[in-house]
Image (spheres, rainbow, N blue to C red):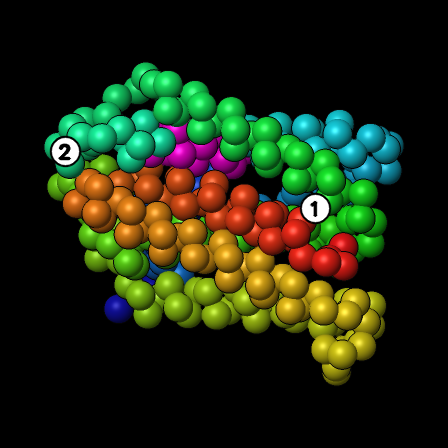
């Protein structure tokens, strides 16, 4: 039976695991509802970044500086350990060896040449995409559409435990060994309903999703979000084949690739922003 205390503990456990912000609450770690809260945590993070961006954009008019500032804040608050997972994954998956050696590489704290190359290319690409998309993120809908990439990344990461098995009998993967697809589906569904509700209610269109929403904004965000989800499935499959299952690094890789996939779709679709 899931009590209100367990629900709060699971929510705080999810936030505590996915953010570097110290939580001012005491709680007992509980992963019972982690699959349910995982995607929604991305919405909370996205809202915070939108607020920061809105304030910064009022005084900073350089897209390059804004992009750099947003990435700096995002990574300091939320993404550094996900980025570390991407780097470790690059070292392990791109190196031709056996599963046991890959698992040892994933536990190694040092970064190899594959990690340096992949990490540098990733940050340059992400910065470039944000810099090019920011000039069009002027209104609330456009800003929300852009920074939903943070929600898309968490949603991608949430799929990894649902499509693979833990590679070890310890670590984050093992803590999520009882990961519930039903709870994940419920969390994704409610999160998407929340996002849809925002776009529908924005600009006073309280009873219609055809009023107040810029044409194609839902189709565009849906396409980009779907691309992000595919990276989650890909990450799960890649780790299952290469290492016998997923680790925390696999989830980090999926989050980062999911964010990049979302931004890439926004950049290539015509008439997006």
Quick one: quadrant of the C terminus? bottom right
Q: From the image, tell me which residue sits under label 2.
A: 98
In this view of the protein, which residue sits in the foreground, 131 or 179?
131
Please tell me whether mark 2 sits on a helix, a strand or a loop.
loop
Please tell me whether mark 1 sits on a helix, a strand or a loop.
helix
Looking at the rendering, the stretch of residues picked out in magenta corresponds to: 77-89
Quick one: quadrant of the N terminus? bottom left
Per the image, is 78 magenta?
Answer: yes
N-term-proximal mark, 2 vs 1: 1
Most distant residue in the bottom direction: 207
Indicate whether 6 appears above or below 15.
below
Left or right of residue 216: residue 260: left
Q: Marks 2/1: CA distance?
A: 43 Å
Identity of the residue drawn at 30% across and 51% down: 236
Q: From the image, tell me which residue sits under label 1.
A: 50
Left or right of residue 220: residue 250: left
* Main secondary structure type of the part rendered in magenta: helix
Residue 13 makes an appearance in the image = no
Per the image, is 135 magenta?
Answer: no
Identity of the residue drawn at 35% across and 48% down: 235
Residue 214, image x, y percentages: 79, 67
Residue 209 makes an appearance in the image = yes
Are there few (<14), some (14-19), or many (20+) residues within 10 Å of tag 2? few
């Amino acid at each position: 039976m899931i009590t209100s205390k367990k629900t709060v503990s699971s929510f705080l456990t999810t936030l505590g695991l996915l953010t570097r912000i110290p939580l001012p609450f005491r709680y007992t770690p509980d992963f019972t509802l982690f699959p349910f809260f995982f995607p929604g945590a991305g919405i909370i993070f996205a809202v915070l970044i939108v607020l920061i961006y809105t304030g910064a954009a009022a005084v900073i008019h350089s897209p390059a500086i804004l992009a750099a500032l947003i990435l700096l804040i995002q990574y300091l608050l939320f993404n550094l350990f996900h980025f570390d997972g991407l780097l470790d994954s690059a070292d392990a998956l791109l190196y031709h060896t056996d599963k046991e050696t890959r698992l040892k590489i994933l536990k190694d704290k040092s970064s190899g040449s594959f990690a340096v190359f992949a990490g540098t290319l990733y940050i340059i690409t992400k910065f470039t995409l944000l810099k090019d998309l920011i000039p069009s993120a002027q209104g609330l809908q456009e800003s929300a559409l852009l920074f939903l990439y943070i929600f898309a990344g968490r949603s991608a990461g949430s799929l990894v435990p649902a499509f693979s098995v833990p590679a070890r009998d310890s670590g984050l993967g093992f803590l999520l060994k009882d990961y519930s697809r039903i709870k994940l589906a419920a969390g994704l569904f409610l999160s998407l309903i929340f996002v849809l509700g925002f776009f529908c209610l924005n600009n006073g269109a309280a009873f219609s999703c055809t009023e107040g929403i810029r044409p194609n904004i839902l189709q565009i965000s849906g396409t980009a979000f779907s691309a992000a989800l595919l990276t989650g499935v890909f990450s799960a499959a890649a780790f299952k084949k290469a290492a016998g299952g997923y680790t925390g690094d696999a989830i980090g890789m999926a989050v980062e690739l999911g964010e990049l996939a979302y931004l890439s779709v926004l950049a290539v679709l015509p008439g997006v922003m």
